[in-house]
Protein backbone atom coordinates (compact mmCIF):
# COMPACT_ATOMS: atom_id res chain seq x y z
CA UNK A 1 0.00 0.00 0.00
CA UNK A 2 1.27 3.44 -0.91
CA UNK A 3 1.39 5.62 2.18
CA UNK A 4 0.00 9.17 2.00
CA UNK A 5 2.25 12.20 2.07
CA UNK A 6 1.52 14.41 5.04
CA UNK A 7 0.49 17.97 4.33
CA UNK A 8 2.55 20.74 5.93
CA UNK A 9 1.68 21.53 9.55
CA UNK A 10 -1.34 23.74 9.93
CA UNK A 11 -1.60 26.61 12.40
CA UNK A 12 -3.43 25.65 15.60
CA UNK A 13 -7.20 25.93 15.38
CA UNK A 14 -9.77 26.35 18.07
CA UNK A 15 -12.31 24.34 16.09
CA UNK A 16 -11.93 20.61 15.82
CA UNK A 17 -12.44 18.87 12.48
CA UNK A 18 -15.73 17.00 12.11
CA UNK A 19 -14.22 13.57 12.76
CA UNK A 20 -13.14 14.74 16.23
CA UNK A 21 -16.69 15.64 17.17
CA UNK A 22 -19.11 13.03 18.41
CA UNK A 23 -22.37 13.03 20.36
CA UNK A 24 -22.21 12.59 24.08
CA UNK A 25 -22.99 8.99 25.05
CA UNK A 26 -25.90 8.14 27.31
CA UNK A 27 -25.23 8.52 30.99
CA UNK A 28 -25.86 4.85 31.82
CA UNK A 29 -23.54 4.06 34.75
CA UNK A 30 -21.54 7.31 34.67
CA UNK A 31 -22.79 8.47 38.07
CA UNK A 32 -22.23 5.09 39.68
CA UNK A 33 -18.68 4.95 38.32
CA UNK A 34 -17.98 8.42 39.70
CA UNK A 35 -19.40 7.46 43.10
CA UNK A 36 -17.24 4.33 43.37
CA UNK A 37 -14.11 6.25 42.33
CA UNK A 38 -14.78 9.10 44.75
CA UNK A 39 -15.38 6.67 47.61
CA UNK A 40 -12.11 4.87 46.89
CA UNK A 41 -10.08 8.08 47.11
CA UNK A 42 -7.84 6.81 44.30
CA UNK A 43 -7.10 9.26 41.49
CA UNK A 44 -7.90 8.49 37.86
CA UNK A 45 -5.98 9.58 34.80
CA UNK A 46 -9.40 10.09 33.21
CA UNK A 47 -9.86 13.18 35.37
CA UNK A 48 -6.29 14.31 35.94
CA UNK A 49 -5.33 14.17 32.23
CA UNK A 50 -8.68 15.59 31.06
CA UNK A 51 -9.25 12.62 28.79
CA UNK A 52 -11.79 13.29 26.01
CA UNK A 53 -13.18 9.77 26.38
CA UNK A 54 -14.18 10.05 30.06
CA UNK A 55 -17.95 10.25 29.45
CA UNK A 56 -17.96 7.22 27.17
CA UNK A 57 -15.73 5.11 29.41
CA UNK A 58 -17.36 5.98 32.72
CA UNK A 59 -20.81 5.34 31.23
CA UNK A 60 -19.57 1.78 30.61
CA UNK A 61 -18.06 1.54 34.15
CA UNK A 62 -14.51 1.67 32.78
CA UNK A 63 -11.83 3.79 34.43
CA UNK A 64 -8.04 4.07 34.44
CA UNK A 65 -6.73 4.41 37.98
CA UNK A 66 -3.67 6.49 38.85
CA UNK A 67 -1.74 5.40 41.94
CA UNK A 68 1.00 7.07 43.99
CA UNK A 69 -0.98 10.29 44.22
CA UNK A 70 -2.01 12.96 41.75
CA UNK A 71 1.13 15.12 41.85
CA UNK A 72 3.92 14.34 39.42
CA UNK A 73 7.62 15.09 39.82
CA UNK A 74 7.94 15.71 36.07
CA UNK A 75 6.45 18.33 33.77
CA UNK A 76 5.64 17.00 30.32
CA UNK A 77 4.40 19.65 27.93
CA UNK A 78 1.44 17.61 26.67
CA UNK A 79 0.07 16.51 30.04
CA UNK A 80 -2.31 18.25 32.44
CA UNK A 81 -1.42 16.23 35.55
CA UNK A 82 -0.24 18.62 38.27
CA UNK A 83 3.51 19.00 38.75
CA UNK A 84 4.28 19.55 42.43
CA UNK A 85 5.91 18.04 45.47
CA UNK A 86 4.03 14.76 45.94
CA UNK A 87 2.22 13.74 49.09
CA UNK A 88 3.50 10.76 51.11
CA UNK A 89 2.55 7.37 49.73
CA UNK A 90 -0.71 6.09 51.21
CA UNK A 91 -0.10 2.55 52.41
CA UNK A 92 -3.78 1.59 52.24
CA UNK A 93 -4.10 2.62 48.59
CA UNK A 94 -3.63 -0.93 47.19
CA UNK A 95 -6.62 -2.21 49.18
CA UNK A 96 -8.79 0.80 48.30
CA UNK A 97 -7.87 0.37 44.64
CA UNK A 98 -8.71 -3.33 44.67
CA UNK A 99 -12.03 -2.61 46.35
CA UNK A 100 -13.03 -0.07 43.69
CA UNK A 101 -12.09 -2.45 40.87
CA UNK A 102 -14.14 -5.22 42.49
CA UNK A 103 -17.19 -2.91 42.76
CA UNK A 104 -16.84 -1.89 39.12
CA UNK A 105 -16.56 -5.59 38.23
CA UNK A 106 -13.84 -4.93 35.65
CA UNK A 107 -12.58 -7.79 33.50
CA UNK A 108 -9.47 -5.76 32.64
CA UNK A 109 -8.05 -2.72 34.40
CA UNK A 110 -5.35 -0.22 33.52
CA UNK A 111 -3.35 1.15 36.43
CA UNK A 112 -1.05 4.07 35.77
CA UNK A 113 0.87 6.40 38.05
CA UNK A 114 2.55 9.74 38.30
CA UNK A 115 6.35 9.80 38.14
CA UNK A 116 7.78 9.57 41.66
CA UNK A 117 11.42 10.51 41.19
CA UNK A 118 11.41 11.53 44.86
CA UNK A 119 11.18 7.94 46.13
CA UNK A 120 14.19 5.62 46.45
CA UNK A 121 12.53 2.99 44.23
CA UNK A 122 10.51 5.59 42.24
CA UNK A 123 7.32 3.94 43.49
CA UNK A 124 7.93 0.51 41.95
CA UNK A 125 7.33 -1.36 45.22
CA UNK A 126 4.03 0.37 45.93
CA UNK A 127 2.91 -0.12 42.34
CA UNK A 128 3.68 -3.84 42.64
CA UNK A 129 1.65 -4.02 45.86
CA UNK A 130 -1.30 -2.51 43.97
CA UNK A 131 -1.08 -5.22 41.30
CA UNK A 132 -0.86 -7.96 43.95
CA UNK A 133 -3.87 -6.56 45.83
CA UNK A 134 -5.98 -6.43 42.67
CA UNK A 135 -5.10 -9.99 41.71
CA UNK A 136 -5.97 -11.17 45.22
CA UNK A 137 -9.33 -9.37 45.37
CA UNK A 138 -10.28 -9.83 41.71
CA UNK A 139 -8.71 -13.10 40.52
CA UNK A 140 -10.42 -12.99 37.11
CA UNK A 141 -9.38 -9.39 36.36
CA UNK A 142 -6.40 -8.93 34.08
CA UNK A 143 -4.09 -6.06 35.03
CA UNK A 144 -2.35 -3.66 32.67
CA UNK A 145 0.28 -1.41 34.24
CA UNK A 146 1.35 1.92 32.77
CA UNK A 147 4.22 3.24 34.90
CA UNK A 148 6.80 5.97 34.35
CA UNK A 149 10.18 4.90 32.99
CA UNK A 150 11.86 4.33 36.41
CA UNK A 151 14.96 5.76 34.66
CA UNK A 152 15.24 2.25 33.14
CA UNK A 153 16.50 0.92 36.48
CA UNK A 154 16.54 -2.85 36.19
CA UNK A 155 15.63 -3.44 39.85
CA UNK A 156 12.53 -1.22 39.61
CA UNK A 157 11.30 -2.83 36.40
CA UNK A 158 11.94 -6.28 37.88
CA UNK A 159 9.91 -5.42 41.00
CA UNK A 160 6.86 -4.53 38.92
CA UNK A 161 7.29 -7.44 36.50
CA UNK A 162 7.54 -9.87 39.42
CA UNK A 163 4.05 -8.80 40.53
CA UNK A 164 2.87 -10.53 37.33
CA UNK A 165 0.73 -7.95 35.55
CA UNK A 166 -0.70 -9.44 32.39
CA UNK A 167 0.39 -6.43 30.34
CA UNK A 168 3.19 -3.89 30.83
CA UNK A 169 2.61 -0.60 29.02
CA UNK A 170 5.12 2.21 28.68
CA UNK A 171 4.40 4.98 26.19
CA UNK A 172 7.03 6.31 23.82
CA UNK A 173 4.65 9.31 23.34
CA UNK A 174 6.38 10.93 20.35
CA UNK A 175 9.20 10.58 17.84
CA UNK A 176 12.84 10.88 18.85
CA UNK A 177 13.40 14.38 17.44
CA UNK A 178 10.49 15.86 19.40
CA UNK A 179 11.05 14.04 22.70
CA UNK A 180 13.15 16.81 24.34
CA UNK A 181 10.44 19.40 23.72
CA UNK A 182 7.47 17.14 24.49
CA UNK A 183 8.73 15.32 27.61
CA UNK A 184 11.99 16.98 28.66
CA UNK A 185 12.74 14.68 31.61
CA UNK A 186 12.34 11.53 29.54
CA UNK A 187 14.62 9.98 26.96
CA UNK A 188 13.44 8.30 23.76
CA UNK A 189 16.08 5.55 23.89
CA UNK A 190 15.48 5.04 27.60
CA UNK A 191 11.81 4.29 26.95
CA UNK A 192 12.83 1.72 24.36
CA UNK A 193 15.20 0.22 26.93
CA UNK A 194 12.30 -0.10 29.40
CA UNK A 195 10.24 -2.12 26.92
CA UNK A 196 13.22 -4.28 26.03
CA UNK A 197 13.99 -4.95 29.70
CA UNK A 198 10.40 -5.99 30.40
CA UNK A 199 10.57 -8.71 27.76
CA UNK A 200 14.00 -9.82 28.96
CA UNK A 201 12.75 -10.10 32.54
CA UNK A 202 9.36 -11.65 31.80
CA UNK A 203 8.87 -12.68 28.20
CA UNK A 204 5.34 -13.93 28.89
CA UNK A 205 4.10 -10.45 29.83
CA UNK A 206 2.56 -8.59 26.91
CA UNK A 207 4.33 -5.28 26.23
CA UNK A 208 2.62 -2.20 24.86
CA UNK A 209 3.42 1.36 23.89
CA UNK A 210 1.57 4.37 22.54
CA UNK A 211 2.31 7.45 20.50
CA UNK A 212 0.49 10.74 19.94
CA UNK A 213 0.40 12.33 16.48
CA UNK A 214 -0.09 15.95 15.52
CA UNK A 215 2.93 17.46 17.29
CA UNK A 216 4.94 18.19 14.14
CA UNK A 217 6.39 14.77 13.38
CA UNK A 218 6.85 13.47 9.83
CA UNK A 219 5.43 10.28 8.39
CA UNK A 220 8.88 8.74 8.08
CA UNK A 221 9.62 9.58 11.72
CA UNK A 222 6.46 7.77 12.78
CA UNK A 223 7.35 4.68 10.79
CA UNK A 224 10.88 4.73 12.21
CA UNK A 225 9.40 4.91 15.72
CA UNK A 226 7.19 1.91 14.98
CA UNK A 227 10.27 0.00 13.82
CA UNK A 228 12.19 0.99 16.94
CA UNK A 229 9.35 -0.31 19.09
CA UNK A 230 9.27 -3.62 17.24
CA UNK A 231 13.06 -3.89 17.62
CA UNK A 232 12.44 -3.54 21.38
CA UNK A 233 10.03 -6.52 21.11
CA UNK A 234 6.95 -4.38 21.77
CA UNK A 235 3.77 -6.40 21.16
CA UNK A 236 0.99 -3.81 21.07
CA UNK A 237 0.81 -0.28 19.67
CA UNK A 238 -1.71 2.53 20.10
CA UNK A 239 -1.76 5.64 17.90
CA UNK A 240 -4.01 8.60 18.69
CA UNK A 241 -4.49 12.27 17.97
CA UNK A 242 -2.82 14.73 20.35
CA UNK A 243 -5.28 17.25 21.75
CA UNK A 244 -3.88 20.07 23.87
CA UNK A 245 -5.45 20.05 27.36
CA UNK A 246 -5.30 23.87 27.37
CA UNK A 247 -4.69 26.49 24.70
CA UNK A 248 -1.97 28.40 26.53
CA UNK A 249 -0.11 26.09 28.88
CA UNK A 250 0.50 23.07 26.66
CA UNK A 251 2.01 22.37 23.27
CA UNK A 252 -0.33 23.38 20.45
CA UNK A 253 -1.66 20.90 17.91
CA UNK A 254 0.31 21.21 14.68
CA UNK A 255 -2.11 19.21 12.53
CA UNK A 256 -5.13 16.96 12.76
CA UNK A 257 -4.72 13.56 11.12
CA UNK A 258 -7.64 12.27 9.08
CA UNK A 259 -9.29 8.89 9.76
CA UNK A 260 -7.76 7.63 6.49
CA UNK A 261 -4.28 8.55 7.71
CA UNK A 262 -4.89 6.71 10.98
CA UNK A 263 -5.98 3.67 9.00
CA UNK A 264 -2.79 3.85 6.94
CA UNK A 265 -0.64 4.12 10.06
CA UNK A 266 -2.42 1.14 11.58
CA UNK A 267 -1.91 -0.93 8.45
CA UNK A 268 1.78 -0.01 8.30
CA UNK A 269 2.25 -0.99 11.96
CA UNK A 270 0.49 -4.32 11.53
CA UNK A 271 2.77 -5.03 8.60
CA UNK A 272 5.74 -4.66 10.93
CA UNK A 273 4.54 -7.49 13.15
CA UNK A 274 2.72 -5.94 16.10
CA UNK A 275 0.27 -8.43 17.57
CA UNK A 276 -2.37 -5.74 17.95
CA UNK A 277 -2.67 -2.13 16.79
CA UNK A 278 -5.28 0.48 17.71
CA UNK A 279 -5.02 3.58 15.52
CA UNK A 280 -7.63 6.33 15.42
CA UNK A 281 -8.38 9.93 16.36
CA UNK A 282 -9.78 9.08 19.80
CA UNK A 283 -7.41 6.24 20.63
CA UNK A 284 -5.59 6.62 23.92
CA UNK A 285 -3.29 4.18 25.65
CA UNK A 286 -6.06 2.85 27.89
CA UNK A 287 -9.03 3.42 25.56
CA UNK A 288 -10.84 0.11 24.92
CA UNK A 289 -7.85 -1.55 26.58
CA UNK A 290 -9.80 -4.71 27.40
CA UNK A 291 -10.74 -5.25 23.75
CA UNK A 292 -7.16 -4.58 22.63
CA UNK A 293 -5.83 -7.06 25.17
CA UNK A 294 -8.31 -9.74 24.10
CA UNK A 295 -7.30 -9.26 20.47
CA UNK A 296 -3.66 -9.59 21.51
CA UNK A 297 -4.33 -12.83 23.35
CA UNK A 298 -6.13 -14.26 20.31
CA UNK A 299 -3.22 -13.35 18.08
CA UNK A 300 -0.76 -14.88 20.55
CA UNK A 301 -2.73 -18.12 20.52
CA UNK A 302 -2.69 -18.15 16.72
CA UNK A 303 1.06 -17.54 16.63
CA UNK A 304 1.72 -20.35 19.10
CA UNK A 305 -0.37 -22.78 17.05
CA UNK A 306 1.44 -21.99 13.81
Image (cartoon, rainbow, N blue to C red):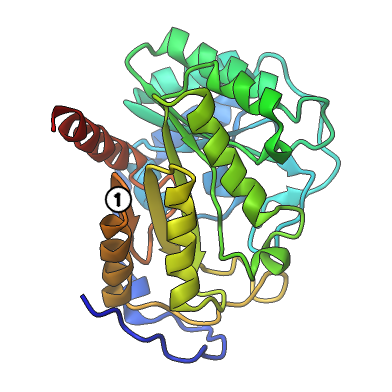
Residue 52 seen in the current view: no
Residue drawn at point x = 35 percent, y = 50 percent: 56
Residue 261: x and y in percent read 32, 75
Where does residue 158 sit, x and y in percent of width and height?
Answer: 61, 22
Nearer-the-camera pick, 194 or 48: 194
Quadrant location of the C terminus in the rendered image: top left
Q: Which of 273 and 242 is in front in this view?
A: 273
Relative side of 90 to 233, left or right: right
Classify residue 58 as left or right of residue 146: left
User: Local crowd at mark 1 within 10 Å, few (<14), some, or many (≥20)?
Assistant: some
Side (left or right) of 42 relative to 60? right
Question: What residue lies at 53% left-to-right and 31% top-to-bottom?
Answer: 198
Q: What residue sits right under mark 1 in the picture?
A: 273
Q: Position of residue 133 (x, y in %)?
A: 53, 12
> Toward the viewer: 212 or 52?
212
> Which structural element holds mark 1?
loop
Residue 248: percent from the left, percent from the top?
71, 76
Does residue 39 appear to the left or right of 138 in the view shown? right
Which residue appears at 82% of the width and 26% of the height?
Answer: 88
State whether residue 163 is above or below residue 8: above
Nearest the viewer among 51 and 35 is: 51
Q: Is residue 269 visible?
A: yes
Q: Who's the residue at 68% across and 51% down the image?
A: 81
Where does the N terminus fall, quadrant-wise? Answer: bottom left
Amino acid sequence: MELPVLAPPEPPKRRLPPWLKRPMPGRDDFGETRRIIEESGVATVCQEARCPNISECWAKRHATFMVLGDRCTRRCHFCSVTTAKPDPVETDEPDRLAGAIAKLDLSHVVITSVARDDLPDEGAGHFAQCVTAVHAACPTTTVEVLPADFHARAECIATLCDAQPELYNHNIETVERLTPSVRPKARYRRSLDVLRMVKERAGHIVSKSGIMVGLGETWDELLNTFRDLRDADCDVLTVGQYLAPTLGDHLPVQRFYTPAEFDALGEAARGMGFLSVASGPFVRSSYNAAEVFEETRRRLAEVRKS
